């Protein structure tokens, strides 16, 4: 997949395209079907499949003081988008100048003139342009005027409810990470560099932990979780504590992951933590011995959970190319 940040990066190299556009926060099952639909339509018509998305998320510009924590940071969003087959991802910088464009101005500048768009695929509730005026009907009228067709994907529902970024966010923040998997098609994950913590895990408790430098925005509810920890593409069973370590009187949020059946130095390494199931609330213990005994129980529960067939993890990391033959 070619990743471009401006139309100039593509150097007018696209003779005709099928485009889907959106914020794609989480790249959930609804987003995946939208991207796959655009790819199928592009292939059927001999067009280039293009995903257009934005950085920062438009809400960060339009409502900076009221934005929710986003499910995926930009790097992960692009990585996930690439897994569903588009040939090009155009990652546009969103600013107030772009926000002021009418639907027709945006469509003509970026999609028709910029990408030679012949077909547009949008989600059931997508709007673009100033005041969100560019709905399906408006875009269809623009298509008749400027020579492109518009397709709309119906809502994707799982467990009798529409898949949405808001639904996923609410579940994660409530600690309900297991029900998130079918909505994302994967476990919810965060990524971070392993940094030095308080040096209590191994030395004091006998359970060494990897302490993450937190860069993600969305974290599960404080507590203990069964997790998979991805180290250089290899998964390891683990148990994570999210919270403030009340037994030790901390006041800063931390994520500490204990890897089962792993030995090695992880300092300075980027790892991914995939949240599988919540084990318990975070709590304050009466002393070190009580805490150590509870950790032993958590580790055993984590191993039991992760040993179940439906808790298995499959890792895929696509190559993100940048040249004309990437795809």
Image (tube, rainbow, N blue to C red):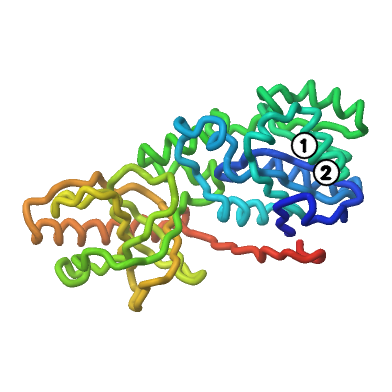
Q: Secondary structure at mark 2?
A: strand
Give the x, y percent position of residue 44: 88, 47
Q: Viewed as shown, does residue 323 lie left or right of 211? A: right
Do tag 1 and tag 2 residues touch (Cβ < 8 Å)? yes
Report how many numbered discs are placed on residues in the image.
2
Category of crowding for the residue at label 2, using alpha-carbon neighbours closer than 10 angstroms: few (below 14), some (14–19), many (at least 20): many
Give the x, y percent position of residue 88: 76, 53
Query: Is 84 in front, or is 265?
Result: 265
Q: Secondary structure at mark 1?
A: strand
- The structure residue drawn at horizontal position 78% and vertical position 50%, both measured from the top left corner, is 7
Determine the image quadrant of residue 105. top right
Residue 281 can be seen in this image: yes
Residue 164 can be seen in this image: no
Query: How much space separates mark 1 and mark 2, taking CA atoms?
Result: 7 Å
Q: Viewed as shown, does residue 307 lie left or right of 51? A: left
Residue extending farthest bottom = 264
Q: Mark 1 vs mark 2: which is more N-terminal?
A: 2
Q: Viewed as shown, does residue 60 lie left or right of 1? A: left
Give the x, y percent position of residue 312: 47, 59
- The structure residue drawn at horizontal position 74% and vertical position 25%, both measured from the top left corner, is 134
The N terminus appears in which quarter of the rendering?
A: bottom right
The C terminus appears in which quarter of the rendering?
A: bottom right
What's the mark number on residue 121?
1
Give the x, y percent position of residue 113: 87, 41
What's the mark number on residue 18?
2
- The structure residue drawn at horizontal position 20% and vertical position 62%, both measured from the top left corner, is 296
């Amino acid at each position: 997949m070619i990743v471009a940040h401006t139309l100039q990066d593509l150097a007018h190299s696209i003779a005709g395209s099928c485009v889907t556009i959106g914020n794609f926060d989480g790249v959930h099952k609804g987003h995946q079907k939208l991207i796959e639909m655009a790819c199928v339509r592009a292939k059927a018509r001999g067009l280039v499949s293009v995903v257009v998305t934005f950085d920062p998320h438009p809400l960060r510009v339009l409502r900076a003081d009221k934005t929710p924590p986003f499910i995926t940071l930009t790097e992960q969003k692009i990585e996930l988008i690439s897994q569903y087959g588009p040939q090009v991802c155009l990652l546009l910088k969103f600013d107030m100048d772009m926000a002021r464009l009418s639907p027709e101005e945006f469509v003509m500048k970026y999609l028709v003139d910029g990408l030679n768009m012949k077909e547009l695929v949008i989600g059931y509730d997508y709007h673009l342009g100033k005041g969100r005026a560019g709905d399906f009907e408006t875009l269809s009228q623009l298509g008749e005027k400027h020579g492109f067709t518009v397709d709309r994907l119906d809502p994707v529902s799982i467990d009798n409810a529409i898949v949405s970024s808001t639904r996923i966010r609410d579940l994660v923040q409530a600690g309900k990470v297991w029900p998130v998997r079918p909505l994302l098609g994967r476990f919810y994950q965060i990524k971070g560099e392993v940094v030095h913590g308080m040096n209590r895990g191994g030395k004091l408790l006998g359970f060494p932990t990897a302490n993450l430098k937190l860069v993600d925005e969305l974290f599960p509810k404080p507590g203990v979780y069964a997790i998979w920890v991805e180290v250089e593409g290899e998964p390891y069973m683990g148990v994570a504590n999210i919270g403030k370590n009340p037994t030790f009187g901390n006041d800063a949020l931390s994520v500490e992951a204990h890897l089962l059946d792993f030995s090695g130095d992880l300092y300075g390494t980027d790892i991914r933590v995939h949240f599988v199931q919540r084990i318990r609330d975070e709590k304050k213990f009466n002393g070190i011995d009580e805490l150590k005994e509870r950790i032993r129980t958590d580790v055993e529960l984590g191993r039991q959970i992760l040993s179940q067939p439906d808790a298995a993890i499959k890792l895929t990391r696509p190559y993100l190319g940048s040249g004309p033959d990437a795809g």
